[in-house]
Image (spheres, grey):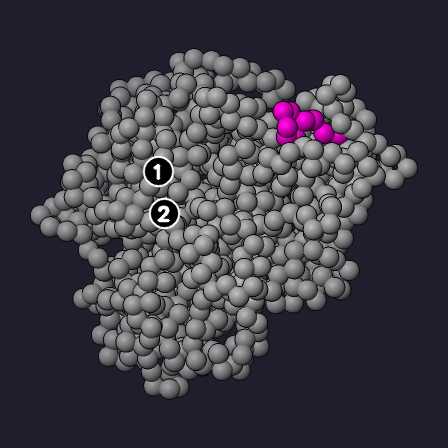
Amino acid sequence: MAETKSTCCYCGVGCGVVIEHEAGRITSVKGDPDHPANFGRLCTKGATLHLSSAPETLIARALYPELRASRDQARTRVSWDTALDTAADRFAAIIAEHGPDAVAVYGAGQLLTEDYYVFNKLVKGLIGSNNLDTNSRLCMSSAVAGYKLSLGADAPPCSYEDIALTQALFISGSNTAFAHPIAFRRVEDARKANPDMKLVVIDPRRTDTAEAADLHLPLLPGTDIALYNAMLHIMLWEGWVNRDYVDAHTEGFDALKKIVREYTPAMAATICGLDRKAIEQAAQIFATSPATMSMYCQGLNQYSFGTHNNSALINLHLATGQIGRPGAGPFSLTGQPNAMGGREVGGLANLLSAHRDMANPQHRAEVAALWGVDSVPDKPGRSAVELFEGLKSGEVKAVWIACTNPAQSMPDQAMIHAALQNAEFVIVQEAFGHTETCAYADLLLPATTWGEKEGTVTNSERAITRVRAAVSAPGEARHDWAIVVDFARRLGIQLGKGDLAARMFPYTSPEEVWNEHRESTRGRDLDITGLSYSLLETAGPQQWPFPEGAQKGKVRLYEDGVFPTPSGRARFVATEHRITAESPSARYPLHLNTGRLRDQWHGMSRTGLVARLYSHEAEPLLHMHKDDMERRSLNNGDLVEVKSKRGAVVLKVIESATLRPGQTFVPMHWGGNTMGGQGVNVLLPRTYDPTSKQPELKHAAIQVAKYTAGKALVAMRRSEPDADGHLQPNPLVVMDRLRRWLPHFPYASLTLAGRNSPVVVLKARGEELAPALLEALDQDLALDDPTQVLSYHDSRKEVEKRARVTGDSLSAVRLAGETKAAEWLADMMVQGHSAAAVRPWLLAPLTQPPAGQAARGKVICNCFDVAEDDILAAFRNGDSLESLQARTRCGTNCGSCVPELKRLAQSVKH
Ligand code: SF4
C-alpha cells in the first residue's frame, strides 16, 4: 500500500488528504495531519472520496472520446486524433466565418490552475476572444467585484488562523456548518478556547450554523445592505466609528455617511424583518469587539446586487478599522476548490492574467508580451448567463464546456437546455459521462479527475497546494491541460498560425505551465515568484504573495493600512438597499431560498455515486413553515408542485422550524439526472448583478400547491458484494437504467440507500402507469420471471406488489398504486432482513408497514451510521450528548454532524 498527499476536490476550504492506494486502485483516504487547512480533519464528503473512485464508479466515467455526426445520432467512440482534429476543424471554420467571438469556453472552479492557464491562453491569446467564463461566475464573482471595488484587489485579507484570534465572528449568508464543515470545526475550537468570543449569524434560515450563534439575525432574503447600513448608522450615532482609521486609510466616507443617515434601526427593522434591538446589538458587537472578523459566501454573492452586498459589509470593517489586524477583516469563503486559482490566471471573461485589468492598455500589452502575441482583446467576453444567451440566439455557435455541468447548475434551466440544443457544436470535456450536460455533447472528451491529476489549487486563504496523482488515468482519459495544448496546436494550424501555436503551447508537464504562470505574477499583488513545485512539495502549502527572496507568504493583508488602489486608500462604497429580482406577489406568494446540503457537492456528478452520501437527505425536499403548510393542507411527505415564472418541479414537502412564515428552502444539488423535470434550478431567475454578472441563484418568488395527480410507483434493486468484493449488480448500472424513466414522471426521485449493500430507489408519480411501462421497468429490476417473483395484485384497490427473493433476502421490489410502505421496505432491504419477515406483508392487501416497524429516518452521523430517530429516542430516554457519543461514537470522527447533534439535544430539552 502506498500513500500520496493531495488536496480534497470539493470545497474551497482546500483540505489536505492522504490517498492510500494499492495496485493502481485508490483504497482509502484520510486527512493530511500536516496540512494547514485541516490538520488531518475531513468532512463527510472528503472522507468518502475513495468511495467515489471505487471500481464500480468506472461505469460513470467518460473513458474514450466520442463523436456524433448529427444531433439525432448517438455518439460513437473515436480516436483522440479524430476527436481533436474534428474539434479544431469545427472551431476554425466557425471562427473563419463568424469571427472569434462566435466560439466560447465555459470552465470550472474545479479545474486546476494549470488547466485554467492554458484554457485562458488558448481563448484570449490564440483565438483572440475573451469568451472564456467559468462556473465561478455563479459562485464568487460578486465577492471578487466587492473586494476590488472596496479594497482595490481580489484578495481575501484574512487567513484561517484568524478564526482562532477573533473576538467577534460574523457569519453572513453562509451555512458554514454544512458548506465548509472543516472551517466550522475551527469556529467550534475557537469558541471552546475562548468562551468570550461572540458568534453572530446573519441568515434568513435558522441553520445549524445559526443555531450555534450567540445572536442570530434572520433577515428577509436580500436585505443585507439595509442591515449593514443601519449598523453603520448606529455606529456613527454611538461614536463607535474609528475616525483615525477612516481618515488615514480610506476615502469616500462622507458620501456613504449621507446615505446611512436614512437607515435608522427602525427603518432597517422593517425592511429586514428584524427586531430593532437585535440590529443594535449586532452593531455594538461588531464595532466594540477588540477584533471582528466576518465570513460570508453565497448568501451575499448570489443576488443581483451581490457586489454591493459584499461592499456594504466591508464598509463596516473599514469604518471600525476591523481589518489588517489579527482576528479582524472580511473573509470571503470560496465555494469551489480552485475558484481563486482560476482568477489568479485571469480565468473569467472580464479578467486578465495575474489580476491584470482588461481595460488597462498597459496590462493588455504586458499579457500580449508574455504570451508572444500582437495583442489581447480589450472587450470583455460573455459571462456565464450571456454566453448561454448567445448560444440560444445563435450569436455564439460553438461552446467547449469543461469540468462543469451547466445543464444542472445554471439558473433558468429551460433557457440553458434550449441554448445547448440550439448550439451548432458542443464539446464537453468531462471525467463523468453521465452528467446532464453530457447529453448535449457532440464531442465528448474524457478527462482525468481527482486522484489522477497533477497540478495546484489555491484555497480560500490564498494558500497554494499541490494536487497529486495517486493512480493512472482510466481508459483513454487525458489531463485537462494536455487536451487543451493538443487542441491548441491543431487549431493553430487550421487558423494559419501553426508556428505561433507551437511556440505558445510548448508544455510537456503541468509544472512547465505553472512556471509560466508564476512568471506572469512578477510584481503583481499576488506575486509568487518565490515559489516552486519543489518548495510546495517539501514545505507544503504556501500563501500568496510570496515574491522572490521571501521566506514565507503573507498571512494577513493590509496590515500597513495601504491598499492597492490608485490613492492607496480603501474605498467606502455608497450602497443602497435594492429589492430582489423577484418579489412575492399574489400569484407567487412565497420566497424560495436555495442552499447546500452537508453531504452533497454541486450537481452530484461525484458525490451522487456514493450511497451513504444520500442518507442525510435522500431527495430534494421543499422545506416550509408549518403555517404555510397548514394553509395549503399539507402534511410532511406530501408532494407539491412548486412553480416560478420560469418553470415547475414536483417535490416532497417537509415542515421546517428553520424558516419564518412565507419562506421556503430547497437544496441546489438535484438536476434532471436524479429527479423529474430539469431540476430545481429551473425555478431560479437568470437576472444578474450588473457589476459582477453573478446571477441571483439564491432567490425566487414561487407558488406551492398540493400535487395529487396520477399514481405512485416505487422501484428498488439491492446489490451485494461478491466474493471479490464487487457489487452485483453494479448499482450505478442499475441507476443508469432507471434514469431513463425519470422524464416519464412529473415527480421522480432516483437515489441510493444503504452502505455496503446499497439499494437503488426510484420513486415516481405519473398520470398513468401504463402496463408496457411497468413491464419494461420489471425487466430493469429482474422482476420479469414469474417463477421467481412474489406478487400480489388488487386492481380494485390499486395495490400491486412484486418482489424477487435472492437467497434469503429481497433483491428487488416494485410497488404500483399504493406505496406507503416504501421507506420501510427500503430499510428492510438495506439491512438485509430475511425475506421471510416481509413475505406475509407482500402477499396480503396490506399497504402500511407493520405496526412498530417504521423506517429509521435520516442518518445524522455518516461515519458511524447513526440515524436521527435513534438519536432522538436516546435523548428522550435521558442520554446526554456525551453518553450517546460514548455508546454510538456518533460525531466523534469527522465531526460534521456535531452541530446537528447539539440541535437535536436542544430540541428534546425544549
Ligand atoms: Fe473537502 Fe470537506 Fe475539507 Fe471542503 S471541508 S475541502 S469538502 S474535506
Tell me the quarter of the image containing the N terminus: top left
Q: Residues at badges 2 and 1 in contact (C-beta under 8 Å)?
A: yes
Q: Residue furthest right?
A: 796
Can you name the residue that lies furthest to the bottom here? Answer: 238
Q: Which quadrant: the C terminus?
A: bottom right
* Residue 583 image-quadrant placement: bottom right
Main secondary structure of the magenta stretch: strand
Q: Residue at x 64, y 39 (%)?
A: 828
Find residue 771 and report its horizontal and vertical position in percent.
81, 26
Find out if the beta carbon at label 1 lies less than 8 Å from the nearest ligand 1 atom: no
Labels 2 and 1: the sequence-earlier one: 1
Q: Kindly identify which residue carries mark 2.
A: 42
Q: State yes or no: Cβ of the residue under disc 2 lies below 8 Å from any atom of ligand 1.
A: yes
Three-letter amino acid code of the residue under disc 2: Leu
- The numbered dot on residue 107 is none
Count the marks: 2
Q: Residue 18 lies in magenta, yes or no?
A: no
Local SS, label 2: loop
Residue occupying image coordinates x 83% and y 39% = 845
Q: Is residue 13 visible?
A: yes
Q: Residues within 10 Å of mark 2 (few under 14, many from 20)?
A: many
Q: State the separation of the CA atoms marked 2 and 1.
A: 9 Å
Q: Quadrant of residue 351?
A: top left
* Residue underneath mark 1: 29
Image coordinates for residue 700, horizontal then vertical, percent: 61, 56
Secondary structure, mark 1, is: strand
User: Bounds of the magenta span?
Assistant: 802-811
Query: Is residue 808 located in the magenta-colored stretch of the structure?
Result: yes
